[in-house]
Image: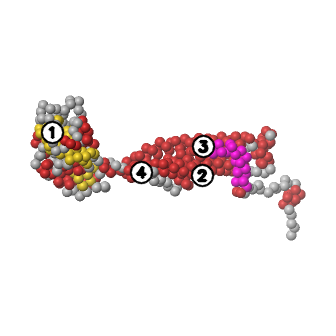
Amino acid sequence: MRWRRSGAGAADAGQSPQLPRSTMRAADLFAEALAGITQRPGRSVMTALGTVLGVAVLVCVLGLTSSAAAQIGSRFDPLTANEVSITDPGDGVTVASYTFRPDAEQRVKSINGVEEAGIGWSLHDVKGQVSLLPPPGTTDPDTKLAYMAASPGLLAEAGATLSSGALYNDWHERTAQPVVVLGPGAARQLSITRAAVGQTIWMDGHRFFLMGILSNTQRHAELLNAVIIPSTTARALFGTPTGAGAFTLWAQVRPGAAAVVASQLADAVNPDLAGTYKVTKPPDISSLKDQVNTDMEGLFLLLAAVSLVIGMVGIANTTFVSVIERTPEIGLRRALGARSRHILSQFLVEAVTLGTLGGLIGASLGTVIVVATCWAKQWTAVLDWRLAVLGPVAGLLVGGLAGLYPASRASRIEPVDALRQS
């Protein structure tokens, strides 16, 4: 058997010698890319800055919106979320009588989930004539007072607290006693102090016994500036409320029971007219959180997208300038046997490396900002572990897309043209 070297045999046969195929290991490829990045570190840092900011904003948006949504859920006003009401909207003209059953309040309180319930309405026929003196003593005509009828249950439902005296009770309500409770704002406007509790006051020509002065309420802030009398007393002295929405029953319910109670409220107050009543229940907290999330994410994700596009343009511009500056080097490497795909891979890896590093730094920066913001606001930070992966992946995609065209152009440079330019 005769042995022959492939190169010598080819030469003896008058053929061009066959050069070994040019290869480039992955380690060499990354080493070349790293050398290209570190050759001009200042430019590389400024190039990656756009990606850093874009990914940081992206992580901040997702992290802060999740944390804010959790905070909204924990701080959602339980007093509003746990209250339902029912009123007779009428037709705006013909509601001429009090349509709630006499035992409507007790029937509502018997519904499973109801903690307190009460009926109330504004007394529009009272013209501000309130005084410690009998007629003709009157209030100042400029005094802005509200006059309200409220059952004892409504005061309990409102979470009313006293600065002095006492609240009227079910006995006063049943017997339509002429008693009155003042809100703190009303007492100030009437110059009535705690010392006046237990005395007689006059309202619209009628004599009332001042039982107490409120200090605050948890609901129904209108009570704070009102002159309040029992609902039965109001009906006896001033007639039944008329007009659309003239009277309302409010019910305080246990957390999570609002929807169930609302579905039974109309039948409880008057099953014969159940279809005519308007029931109001609190909004679903989950839908509220979703709406807040959507609004916040939509706005800030646009900002993150703009930042990422700016980062992409920066990487593309830097890679393109690098291709122009290194054209002689590219020509020399092509002349020494480097293939087009090697040149393409090198510049593409440089761009991807810059993008990935920018994404990694941006994700870390965004996480720090989210945690610091939540700590400053005393929130509980809510961060999805996938954000740690999302940042570098976003940077990788940005770098890859940004470097694709410059790398493709570099791979098409002919060795002769490149060496001629040098």
Residue 50 bears which disc, if any?
3
Give neighbour class at mark 3: few <14, some 14-19, many 20+ (Cα, 10 Å): many
Residue 360 bears which disc, if any?
2
Query: Mark 4 or mark 3, which has the lower sequence index?
Result: 3
Kind of element beneath mark 2? helix
Foreground of the two, 98 or 412: 98
Which residue is under mark 4? Answer: 71
> What's drawn in magenta, residue-wise?
28-48
* Tag 1 and tag 3, C-beta contact below 8 Å: no
Task: Give the residue drawn at x 73%, y 46%.
Answer: 39
Select label 1 or label 3 by which is in front.
1
| Quadrant position of the C terminus in the picture | top right
Query: Mark 1 or mark 2, which has the lower sequence index?
Result: 1
Horizontal relation, residue 418 to residue 261: left or right: right
Report the Cα–Cα distance between label 1 and label 4. Answer: 47 Å
Outermost residue, right direction? 12
Foreground of the two, 51 or 72: 72
Kind of element beneath mark 1? strand
Look at label 2 and name its amino acid.
Answer: Leu
Select label 4 or label 3 by which is in front.
4
Foreground of the two, 121 or 276: 121
Report the Cα–Cα distance between label 1 and label 3. Answer: 73 Å
Residue 302 covered by magenta stretch? no
Residue 201 bears which disc, if any?
1
* Tag 2 and tag 4, C-beta contact below 8 Å: no
Look at label 1 and name its amino acid.
Answer: Ile
Residue 45 covered by magenta stretch? yes
Select label 2 or label 4 by which is in front.
4
Query: Quadrant location of residue 415?
Result: top right
Query: Mark 1 or mark 4, which has the lower sequence index?
Result: 4
